[in-house]
């Protein structure tokens, strides 16, 4: 069977590259993935795979029934791009101004389309059912696209027993892949803070209440939550990424608006964050004579790999990659809306190496960078891992 899988992957390898380049050239933002969804649907229908359209918005689902009513495994790929102006210089660069596949979702979609081609030819050997889940709006934090698909029944009819996904990962060289049980990505929440002061002339600060100075103290003090309220062996991040306020160089600002992100791997720590942060903001602003507004918006929860399913996936990875199947030392504090699936059923999330050989991590543009260009050799590797996982899972 392994030989036959490799033969079929080689058969479709050039087509999968074409899919990737076509999707990369025509990126679409979250909830606008109409062209990509149409491409996906055309491929699935052409393979005589039962196809469901407009699931959770622009989502597409393919259902491939094998030779039995055994368990159901789902494979998920995200389809949306980012609001970034591409600067890769590739011949298939984005033709959509200000939109780019800078997170590799073009790779994910192409990989899953390739899996559909191969598995449709191996239908009689599949001891169960495979669902192909092409999901919109992964980048649309805090809502995401997974909840909408779940609400509209993507995990039912037939009921899904396990779900697997992967993400191209430039920190790993092409030919490597990583997975571990437990958290793989962090919760991704948002905070909105408004500092209220009193305006005055810059030459007479005593007549005002300086919102800039208050905000500076708040930003610095927020880091003490991580360094002094959370254990040193725990992972947590509070980052302020946006700061707006002020009118003129010689006017004391009466208002500063801040936005930031809070990342955690432990749900208990995550749930404690809103109260901890607001207490700190309240204490500083009131002590300095100002006021505040505070809003905490929960986004994606942590993506948690289920132990037994992770063992199955890792076993499949070892058969494909041997010693290049690795167990990461730690999770990423990036957010991923696949986490909503992991809350509902056993799930496994894979990091697929995509850094070209000979390049260091420092030399390789990271995810969400306008020069991000994953190695296309990772496409067939991702296909083989997912296909091997399907047979490993359904044979159990």
Image (tube, rainbow, N blue to C red):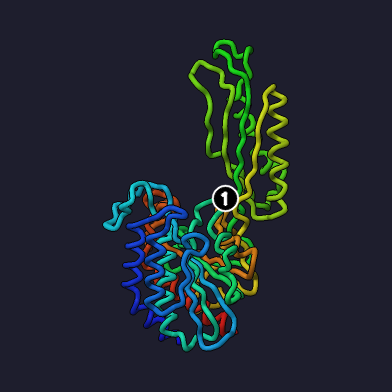
| Above or below for 152 versus 396 | above
Q: Is residue 52 left or right of residue 375?
A: right
Task: Give the quadrant of the C terminus.
Answer: bottom right
Task: Give the quadrant of the N terminus.
Answer: bottom left
Q: Quadrant of residue 224?
A: top right
| Above or below for 66 versus 342 | below
Residue 177 shows up from this direction: no
Q: Tell me residue 82's x, y (percent).
A: 43, 51
Give the residue pinned by disc 1: 142
Q: Quadrant of residue 284?
A: top right
Q: Tell me residue 156's x, y (percent).
A: 59, 72
Viewer-nearest residue: 303 or 169: 303
10 Å crowding of disc 1: few (<14), some (14-19), many (20+): some
Which residue is found at the position 49% from the left and 56% from the top? 137
Which residue is found at the position 55% from the left and 63% from the top? 149
Q: Quadrant of residue 229?
A: top right
Viewer-nearest residue: 214 or 155: 155
Q: Tell me residue 75's x, y (percent).
A: 51, 71
Q: Is residue 282 left or right of residue 143?
A: right
């Amino acid at each position: 069977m392994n030989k036959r899988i490799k033969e079929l992957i080689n058969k479709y390898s050039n087509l999968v590259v074409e899919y990737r380049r076509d999707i990369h050239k025509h990126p679409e933002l979250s909830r606008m993935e109409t062209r990509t969804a149409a491409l996906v649907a055309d491929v699935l229908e052409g393979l005589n795979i039962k196809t469901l359209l407009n699931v959770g918005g622009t989502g597409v689902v393919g259902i491939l029934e094998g030779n039995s009513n055994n368990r159901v495994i789902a494979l998920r790929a995200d389809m949306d791009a980012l609001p970034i102006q591409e600067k890769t210089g590739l011949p298939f660069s984005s033709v959509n101004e200000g939109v780019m596949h800078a997170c590799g979702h073009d790779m994910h979609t192409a990989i899953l389309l390739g899996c559909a081609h191969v598995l449709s030819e191996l239908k009689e050997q599949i001891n169960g059912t495979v669902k192909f889940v092409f999901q919109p709006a992964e980048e649309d934090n805090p809502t995401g696209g997974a909840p909408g698909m779940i609400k509209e029944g993507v995990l039912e009819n037939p009921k899904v027993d396990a779900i697997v996904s992967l993400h191209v990962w430039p920190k790993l060289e092409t030919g490597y892949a990583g997975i571990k049980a437990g958290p793989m990505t962090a919760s991704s929440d948002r905070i909105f803070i408004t500092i209220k002061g009193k305006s005055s002339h810059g030459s007479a600060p005593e007549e005002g209440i300086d919102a800039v100075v208050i905000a500076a103290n708040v930003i610095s003090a927020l880091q003490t939550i991580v360094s002094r309220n959370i254990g040193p062996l725990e992972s947590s991040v509070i980052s302020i990424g946006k700061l707006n306020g002020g009118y003129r160089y010689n006017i004391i600002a009466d208002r500063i608006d801040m936005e930031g992100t809070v990342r955690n791997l432990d749900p208990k720590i995550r749930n404690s964050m809103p109260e901890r942060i607001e207490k700190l903001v309240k204490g500083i602003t009131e002590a300095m004579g100002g006021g505040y507004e505070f809003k905490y918006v929960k986004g994606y929860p942590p993506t948690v790999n289920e132990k037994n399913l992770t063992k199955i996936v890792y076993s499949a990875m070892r058969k494909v990659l041997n010693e290049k199947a690795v167990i990461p030392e730690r999770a990423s504090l990036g957010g991923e809306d696949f986490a909503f699936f992991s809350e509902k059923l056993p799930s496994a999330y894979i990091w697929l190496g995509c850094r070209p050989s000979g390049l260091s991590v420092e030399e390789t543009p990271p995810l969400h960078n306008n020069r991000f260009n994953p190695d296309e050799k990772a496409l067939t590797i991702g296909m083989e891992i997912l296909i091997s996982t399907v047979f490993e899972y359904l044979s159990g």
